[in-house]
Amino acid sequence: MEDAVVEAYTAYWPASTRAVTLPREEARRLLSQYETDDQVEGELKGIARYQAMHREGWGEVVVHVQKVTLKGDTATVLDCMDASRYGEADSRTHKLISGTRSVPYFSVEATMRRGADGRWRVAQTKALGSKCTR
């Protein structure tokens, strides 16, 4: 079961980046595969703001799951994420915006929930504000 949590968490990040480039309903369909309904609605609001600023994700994040804690249909994932190859791009030119590149190796905690369909989905993510090592 831990493997399924890690797989779902890992797949969430590229899907989240891709969703920013999609029309609202396509983004909703994509995100609903990886996020709980509440998380999808919150992310769609953020995507609308992002799109209004002509921004999109650039590059990729690399997850390094450190720990998974399971409790019934809820899991907590502790990740030492490397986002040094991720930043923001102008959605019209797709070029990296200077100064938006992220940092390597910082702690991220995600709460995952298993749905009635048996799939694990992200319910919440938060940066813990601390550096980490893989």
Image (cartoon, grey):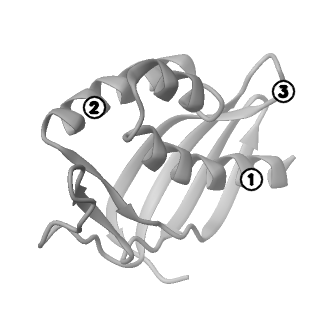
Q: Earlier in the sequence, mark 1 or mark 2?
A: 1
Tell which of 132 and 93 is nearer to you.
93
The CA span between labels 1 and 2 is 24 Å
At which x and y percent is residue 34? Answer: 62, 35
Chain-order first, disc 3 or disc 2: 2
Q: Residue at x 36, y 54 (%)?
A: 127
Quarter of the image for residue 97 reads bottom left
Tell which tag, 3 or 2, sits nearer the viewer. Answer: 2
User: Which class describes the residues within 10 Å of circle 2: few (<14), some (14-19), or many (20+)?
Assistant: few
- Residue 34 vs 24, above or below: the answer is below
- Image position, residue 130 (x, y; %): 33, 69
Reply above or below: 20 against 72: below
Q: x%, y% of residue 133?
A: 48, 83
Look at the picture and state if 36 lies above or below 65: above
Looking at the image, the residue that sits furthest to the front is: 93
Give, as a three-letter code, the residue at label 3. Gly
Tell me if 80 is positioned left or right of 85 in this view. right
Q: Nearer the viewer, residue 26 or 60?
A: 26
Q: Which mark is residue 69?
A: none
Q: Please say if the residues under marks 3 and 2 sit with CB atoms less than 8 Å apart.
A: no
Q: Nearer the viewer, residue 59 or 116?
A: 59
Q: CA distance from mark 1 to mark 3?
A: 13 Å
Q: Which mark is residue 7?
A: 1
Q: Which residue is mark 2?
A: 46
Q: To which residue does mark 3 refer? A: 118
Q: Closer to the N terminus: mark 1 or mark 3?
A: 1
